[in-house]
Amino acid sequence: MEDRLHMDNGLVPQKIMSVRLQDSTLKEVKDQASNKQAQILEPRPEPSLEIKPEQDGMEHVGRDDPKALGEEPKQRRGSASGSEPAGDSDRGGGPIEHYHLHLSSCHECLELENSTIESVKFASAENIPDLPYDYSSSLESVADETSPEREGRRVNLTGKAPNILLYVGSDSQEALGRFHEVRSVLADCVDIDSYVLYHLLEDSALRDPWTDNCLLLVIATRESIPEDLYQKFMAYLSQGGKVLGLSSSFTFGGFQVTSKGALRKTVQNLVFSKADQSEVKLSVLSSGCRYQEGPVRLSPGGLQGHLENDDKDRMIVHVPFGTHGGEAVLCQVHLELPPSSDIVQTPEDFNLLKSSNFRRYEVLREILTTLGLSCDMKQVPALTPLYLLSAAEEIRDPLMQWLGKHVDSEGEIKSSQLSLRFVSSYVSEVEITPSCIPVVTNMEAFSSENFNLEIYRQNLQTKQLGKVILFAEVTPTTMRLLDGLMFQTPQEMGFIAIAARQTQGKGRGGNAWLSPVGCALSTLLISIPLRSQLGQRIPFVQHLMSVAVVEAVRSIPKYQDINLRVKWPNDIYYSDLMKIGGVLVNSTLMGETFHILIGCGFNVTNSNPTICINDLVTEYNKQHKAELKPLRADYLIARVVTVLEKLIEEFQDKGPNSVLPLYYRYWVHSGQQVHLGSADGPKVSIVGLDDSGFLQVHQEGGEVVTVHPDGNSFDMLRNLILPKRR
């Protein structure tokens, strides 16, 4: 804010402070306002306001300089008078020069200037909206606006982050809701640290010279656009501006928006042509309108989108304008709306839109990139320290005693991949790398928005598992955190590593990804005796963990119909449609004991770009008029570990048949017929799991075949079991 405050003598304030006017001064201001003609006040020897500076704050430039005093402004907006004689001051013998103090890019501040009195040295920034406008470049008429003063790429003269302005129609609650929807989807596509997204109101669009500081104008309203505002938008285009129309009435160049009632609020198949002429096919929600061809020909290679119907209704057009690079991409499909939107009418429509949600973002990013924005992957977040936490008070002292015996002279426990350095506190100067991470042992120093230790404690009902927590806001992968501890920790301590985000998350086949906030990410350490029911059937561990995730959700009272399921061999699915999570198991046999790391990640609150558990809760509430509450990752992780311990106990006591009924209740494959190997392979029916946990299929000739998960990947969409490439 300070860099947008200017005084006519060239000084720039370094710090903004709030001020409190004395009663006598407030009375003077009131008396002044009642006078029809402004009067210049004589400077008073005593200050008429009290300023309480912040501790250690820098003083304002000109605090003791009479030239920093603000003169009562002229009545005309934008007055630039330099000085005017006034009475002598006790601070000096000569006349005092008065200078305006104003926020050059804020209309409200300019209006406020008309009631500023001489004794107010500093302006408060409270309640002044952070707008991207600059009055120094005001345009006087549409005629002037259509004559661009510069060519080529637009320049951001203010030095602020490039602006994306969102116009969503008249000022109403409905428009405000639409603004939040559009802003949310754009923030998922571009780096919000590189761009600033503003709500462009109609009066500001008409009054303020926003065109010089706008990289992209987004128009998302069905309302008819007033003629004067339409001319303003066209002037912006003529200067090389970029426009994205989202289900809007805005159009130009002879294109017309025509209504087709049969399409309104229906899910349709869209064929979208990218700039390189490759195609993306996806399900979209139609606005009920389409574009009719005009005299302007689309530029070769321009983006296009049409419905996959007999009329091939045109829904996305890419239209150039003028000679300075202006262009618009106009859409009549609701790319801005999530599948959970209230206007999505049926569960079938929700399923279709959710299945295409990733491709919806692909189309949006292609459009934004074509319009000159960067949609590169956001910068990988910085790693954070680990915190050593305990879910039970009685385990804390034994834990610290064990730790004291196992760290080396530098307080570290080392493995082949990672060194954990245990410290009582963390200072930001200590470097954190993927190979060396500090672990803070002082629990009182722990606080996180993403992990509530008390919620975890209340919902963890285990004898051993998950009692000791290593938590990080950002870590490479939870699988690696326990690597150096898995052969040393006492079994009763039950270590678990939990993270809010991972930068190198691991999956089957060595896949890696950046795990977003909202995903429940954990790695659990367990020990299984070799000569036990489960020790003889280790592949069952991944099945037990998968079913534990589903049971943890569906065993919550009233959540039993949330359609969460397991898919062989190690996935958690929404119905049989979309993956919502997965399990990865690494086991090492040492002597007579399997030391096993169970990595698990499933989407809880991160709705985009695919799907999460809370999406299913929201959709269930909408379809059944229910009021189920959204779930938390820390709550569910505790429940999953609790369910898993019970399943392991039952398996060890009674073998596979004790848990298979629950597994079959939740799996997606009952009665399914598939082809082995390829579409031309033998047709088989899925039977279930064999005694070792591998998938069994029944061939038409009567033979039962066991399929190992390490050699096959399951493709639900094509109904195939395919050999995994090595």
Image (cartoon, rainbow, N blue to C red):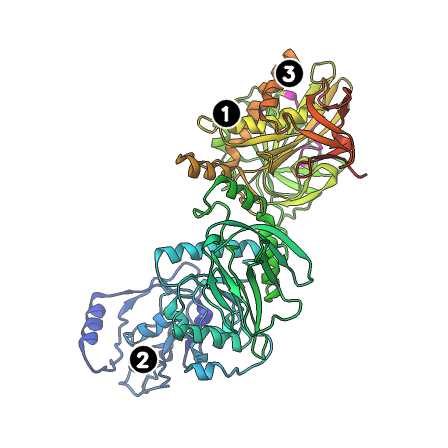
Relative to residue 273, is residue 452 drawn left or right?
left
Whichever of callouts 2 and 1 sits on the residue coming sooner in the sequence is: 2
Q: For mark 1, what is the residue?
A: 555
- Reply yes or no: does residue 485 show up in magenta: yes
Q: Is residue 568 visible?
A: yes
- Reply yes or no: does residue 640 show up in magenta: no
Callout 3, which amino acid?
Phe
Q: Are marks 3 and 2 in contact (CB under 8 Å)?
A: no
Q: For mark 2, what is the residue?
A: 71
Q: Which residue is at the far right?
A: 726
Callout 2, which amino acid?
Glu
The region drawn magenta spans 481-491
Q: Is residue 411 visible?
A: no
Q: For mark 3, what is the residue?
A: 651
Whichever of callouts 3 and 1 sits on the residue coming sooner in the sequence is: 1
Of the residues tagged 3 and 2, which is closer to the observer?
A: 3
Towards the viewer: 479 or 72:
479
